[in-house]
Image (cartoon, helix red, strand yellow):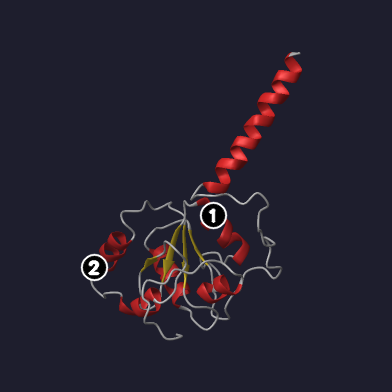
Amino acid sequence: MIFRQILVIVGLSVILGLGLNTVSPNKIDVIGKYRSLSAGNGPIVPPSASEGDPPFIAIDLAELEYSQGTTLFIDTRDPEEFECGTIPGSINIPFDYLPEENLEQYIDSALGGATLDQAMIAFCSGEECDLSLHLARNLQAMGYTNASIFFGGSREWEKFGLDIEKRRADCADL
């Protein structure tokens, strides 16, 4: 008798939960739409990489770090490129516009007071862009111990069907 009551309660809970999910604005897909986690090729490492550089990470690890929501993503491209399409939630520290004076103060401010062991991933547009490598080297030299480089950048991110945040509508393909 108790077993039957438990089954009825569980059954009604499932039906009620599924029913509420179908009308909820924050609906969760019953059958997920997931892509394969691995890109299969490992991280992209540029020819200009040197021993002692921050680690390079592949798309699957970048996506995992992004999904956990605790890693700072730093777009190192020009502000216009950043606004026209970046990894959602990224901050912009354009390497070409870094000040020569008070660099550490500028970067500390741009990072919003992040601790030296804060996980952060620098990226730019893709394999033809080495701004992320240069910024990550600067971060490492400043004492940030958990910086890495996603050299595939926003182009690889978009290629794998991941969301891109566009902050401007008047963008030409950059």
Q: Is residue 141 left or right of residue 104?
A: right
Please, is residue 131 above or below residue 72 in the view?
below
* Residue 20 coordinates in the image, percent (x, y): 55, 41
Q: Nearer the viewer, mark 1 or mark 2?
A: 1
**Who is closer to the viewer here, 13 or 88?**
13
Q: Toward the viewer: 69 or 76? A: 69
Q: Nearer the viewer, residue 36 or 3?
A: 3
Q: Amino acid at mark 2?
A: Asn
Q: CA distance from mark 1 to mark 2?
A: 33 Å
Tell me the residue that label 1 is attached to. Answer: 67
Residue found at the very far top of the displayed protein: 1
Placement of 169 over or under 13, stated as above or below: below
Tell me residue 45's x, y (percent). Answer: 59, 74
Write the residue at 30% across / 60% down: 108
| Number of other residues with Cα within 10 Å of mark 2, as a class: few under 14, some 14 to 19, many 20 or more | few
Describe the element under mark 2 as helix, strand or loop. Answer: loop
| Residue drawn at (56%, 62%) of the image | 62
Can I make out residue 58 in this image?
Answer: no
Q: Residue at x 39, y 58 (%)?
A: 143
Q: Label 1's element? A: helix
* Residue at which label 2 appears: 102
Q: Are marks 1 and 2 in contact (CB under 8 Å)?
A: no
Determine the image quadrant of residue 56: bottom right
Q: Quadrant of the N terminus?
A: top right
Circle 1 packing at 10 Å, graded few (<14), some (14-19), many (20+), is few
Mark positioned earlier in the residue sequence (1 or 2): 1
Residue 1 falls left or right of residue 168: right
Image spot of residue 83 (x, y percent): 37, 74
- Do we see residue 36 in this rendering? yes
Three-letter code, disc 1: Ser
> Residue 3, relative to residue 15: is it above or below?
above
Q: Residue at x 47, y 75 (%)?
A: 124
